[in-house]
């Protein structure tokens, strides 16, 4: 990462021109490794609680679909709630983002750590993707920080929208996780139906900063691509250390995302160091 790139990211955050997009890798920053931080780890945890065919024990969406089909949707939700029952303590990077009063933060995992980091702030709320198997023709639900449901009109007043596109353990155990859940969403996501107007409005003219995300699965690439859609020309960045899979490299090139080959702790240290010097 060059000093110029770092300065550009800090300026974009300060000017609210970039949207943090958080993946499960953010959990690596937390002290207590108490909840699953990858799709494989979550699938294995589900497999440990119920009998699954061997070939799908590491495939999250297939494992979730099997449980939904043969054990009932309520059993799947219960197991997901158990997997994320312990709330991880937010890391300094979570807390730093929470203080920036950004108009939109995307959190694409089920743990709710970013919501915990925002708890001390004012004027924010959660917008969660929900399963149509449970909620009929609804794509999303809106919640105040205390878990009270509200409507889209009230949500328009929020200073910060925490968008959780695949759901979250809190406040209501909403999960997009099974094959059928994703089929419902992906069938219409290209025309943006599952992405609420509030998110579409707040992404306009802004870039994205991907933190804790990998793009080595079709699902993660599809969600990121569609949430970025029509946001503007960026710039976009991804803090993505280590060797990349070929499909990740292609995705970054396709979406014009600048890669920062460093881990999240190093990124946070660099950001705060520059800000302290500037102050």
Image: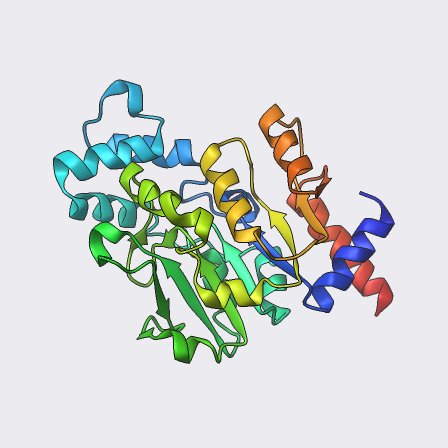
Q: Position of residue 153 (x, y in %)?
A: 40, 79
Quadrant in which the N terminus appears: top right
Side of 24 where 12 appears, left or right: right
Quadrant in which the C terminus appears: bottom right
Q: How is the image coloured?
A: rainbow
Identify the image quadrant of residue 56: top left
Q: Position of residue 68 (x, y in %)?
A: 19, 39
Q: Residue at x 22, y 48 (%)?
A: 78
Q: Residue at x 29, y 56 (%)?
A: 173
Q: Residue at x 65, y 37 (%)?
A: 254
Residue 255 visible in this rendered orientation of the protein: yes
Above or below residue 66? Residue 276 is below
Above or below residue 250? Residue 85 is below
* Of 241 and 188, the residue lying toward us: 188
Residue that protrudes farthest toward the top in the picture? 55
Residue 109 visible in this rendered orientation of the protein: no
Side of 250 where 77 appears, left or right: left
* Of 199 and 160, the residue lying toward us: 199
Above or below residue 123? Residue 13 is above
Side of 168 where 68 appears, left or right: left
Q: Position of residue 159 (x, y in %)?
A: 54, 76
Q: Residue at x 39, y 74 (%)?
A: 152
């Amino acid at each position: 990462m060059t000093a110029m790139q770092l300065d550009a990211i800090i300026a974009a955050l300060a000017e609210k021109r970039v949207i943090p997009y958080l993946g499960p890798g953010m959990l690596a920053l937390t002290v207590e490794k108490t909840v699953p931080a990858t799709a494989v780890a979550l699938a294995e945890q589900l497999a440990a609680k119920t009998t699954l065919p061997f070939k799908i024990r590491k495939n999250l969406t297939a494992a979730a679909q099997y449980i939904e089909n043969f054990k009932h949707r309520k059993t799947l939700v219960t197991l997901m709630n158990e997997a994320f029952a312990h709330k991880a303590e937010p890391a300094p990077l979570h807390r730093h983002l929470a203080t920036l009063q950004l108009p939109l933060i995307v959190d694409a995992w089920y743990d709710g750590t970013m919501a915990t980091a925002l708890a001390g702030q004012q004027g924010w709320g959660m917008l969660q993707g929900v399963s149509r198997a449970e909620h009929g023709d609804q794509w999303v639900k809106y919640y105040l920080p205390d878990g009270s449901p509200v409507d889209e009109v009230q949500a328009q007043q929020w200073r910060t929208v925490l968008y959780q596109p695949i759901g979250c353990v809190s406040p209501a155990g909403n999960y997009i996780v099974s094959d059928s859940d994703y089929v419902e969403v992906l069938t219409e996501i290209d025309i943006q139906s599952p992405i609420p107007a509030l998110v579409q409005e707040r992404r306009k003219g802004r870039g994205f900063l991907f933190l804790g995300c990998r793009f080595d699965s079709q699902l993660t690439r599809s969600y990121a691509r569609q949430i970025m859609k029509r946001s503007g020309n960026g710039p976009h960045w991804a803090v993505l250390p280590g060797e990349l899979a070929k499909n990740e490299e292609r995705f970054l090139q396709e979406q014009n995302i600048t890669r920062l080959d460093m881990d999240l702790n190093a990124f946070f240290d660099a950001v705060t160091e520059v800000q302290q010097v500037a102050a």
